[in-house]
Image (cartoon, rainbow, N blue to C red):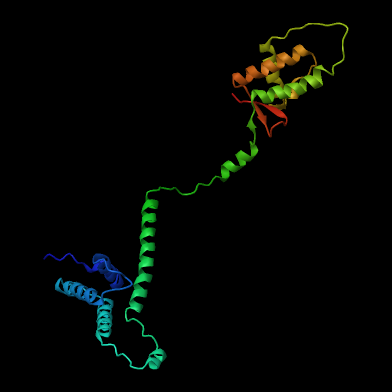
Amino acid sequence: MQYSVKLDGFEGPLDLLLHLIQTYEVDIYDIPVAIITEQYLQYIHTMKELKLDVASEYLVMAATLLAIKSKMLLPKHEDDFLDQQMELDVEEDPRDELVRRLIEYRKYKFAADELKEREAARSLVYTREPLDLSQFEKEETAQQVTNVTLYDMLQAMQKVFQEKVTRSPRQTTIERQEIPIETRMDQIKQSLLSVGGKRRFTDLFDKSSKEHVVVTFLAILELMKVKSINCEQQDHFSEIYITMIEE
């Protein structure tokens, strides 16, 4: 058998007709009914020869094509009187209804092909089921802070200098007392532990001397470096909080 025709290869008689129109490269608006009907009947005959089940809709289309072919073969009567010709309605082309059906079917066929291509492309994308992130929502709400940079801390230091050093009363006697950074680090840790592990940045500067302010600031930076404390800030330019990190 040299026939490769399969009924499953076509989705219906209109699909078979479109295949024939494309194969023979004919104008869908000017279908040569005689040629298309002949080829269509050959397909039907081949299907039967191969003992394939031919749906009734294929046979209905075959009868439709034969009817159109018969109408187009009928001789056209010309009227001798011009006035009678003007009164006669223009006869519709027997192929018009079939052409409309084919054009409409072709639109849906093109749309179906495009959807299949999108489906094929979408099948290459792998997704996962949505996760329940409600347990993380509370944690995120509780820790809505921005990363505190050195520039944020320097800005806070400007405020400390203005409130502590600049406004401190002048003393006639200046006593210089140097505090080791390690000692101040231990003092800051003890101060945090005494209030539950969290204090405002400005509260750690409990003395107004410039030396104390500088040493405290350096001690805070060193504690951050060794990851003993963490700095939190709700919004930019807002109060900075120092939090003890549990060992």
Q: Is residue 21 left or right of residue 163?
A: left
Q: Nearer the viewer, residue 201 or 132?
A: 201
Q: Nearer the viewer, residue 46 or 140?
A: 46
Q: Residue at x 29, y 88 (%)?
A: 76
Q: Nearer the viewer, residue 81 or 141?
A: 81
Question: x and y percent of residue 153 in the render?
Answer: 69, 23
Q: Quick check: can you spot residue 196?
A: no
Q: Residue at x 26, y 76 (%)?
A: 33
Q: Is residue 149 left or right of residue 45?
A: right
Q: Nearer the viewer, residue 232 or 146?
A: 146
Q: Quick check: can you spot residue 133?
A: yes
67 is higher (above) or lower (below) than 28: below
Q: Residue at x 38, y 85 (%)?
A: 90
Question: x and y percent of residue 172 in the render?
Answer: 88, 7
Question: x and y percent of residue 21 in the render?
Answer: 27, 68
Quadrant for residue 11, please give it: bottom left
Q: Residue furthest left?
A: 1
83 is higher (above) or lower (below) than 47: below
Q: Is residue 88 left or right of residue 53?
A: right
144 is higher (above) or lower (below) than 121: above
Question: x and y percent of residue 235 in the render?
Answer: 69, 34
